[in-house]
Image (tube, grey):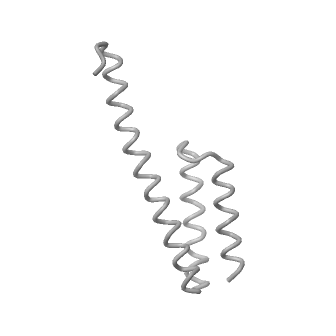
């Protein structure tokens, strides 16, 4: 444990931010899995609706600094390719 008060605060802030980031990342993974499940089921309408929600979630994660913009672009391209293949 740190001896300096500001370092103690940084530890607490880091723990809090880590939990927030973990929650966003987990929600993003869940959203992607929902989209992929709709694609696997062959439900084009549901997949199209979930695609826009998933892309929005990915963009939100980029804005919050959880994903790199190139990683997000890669994910979105892969999802778009799967949607187009339906």
Q: Please give the name of the residue rendered at 46% of the width and 65% of the height, measured from the top-left corner.
A: 30
Kindly give the residue lying farthest to the front in the view shown: 1
In front of the other: 61 or 2: 2
Residue 48 in percent (x, y) is at 61, 77
Position of residue 74 relative to residue 17, above or below, is below
In this rendering, the answer to whether 33 lies above or below 18 is below
Please state the horizontal and vertical placement of residue 37, each as a whole percent of the image: 51, 77
The residue drawn where x is 28% and y is 22% is: 1
**Left or right: where does residue 4 sit relative to residue 60?**
left
Q: Find residue 84 and report its horizontal and vertical position in percent.
A: 71, 77
Indicate the quadrant where residue 77 lies.
bottom right
Residue at coordinates 54% horizontally, 58% vertically from top-left? 57
Q: Nearer the viewer, residue 39 or 53?
A: 39
Quadrant including the C terminus? bottom right
Placement of 54 over or under 86, stated as above or below: above
Q: What residue is drawn where x is 54% and y is 85%?
A: 41
Identify whether 49 is placed above or below 5.
below
**Which one is in front, 65 or 11?**
11
Q: Is residue 10 left or right of residue 50?
A: left
């Amino acid at each position: 444990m740190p001896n300096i008060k500001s370092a103690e605060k940084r530890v607490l802030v880091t723990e809090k931010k880590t939990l927030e980031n973990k929650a966003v990342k987990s929600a993003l993974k869940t959203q992607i899995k929902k989209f992929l499940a709709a694609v696997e089921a062959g439900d084009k309408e549901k997949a199209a609706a979930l695609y826009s929600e998933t892309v929005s979630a990915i963009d939100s994660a980029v804005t919050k600094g959880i994903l790199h913009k190139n990683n997000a672009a890669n994910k979105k391209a892969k999802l778009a390719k799967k949607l187009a293949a339906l």
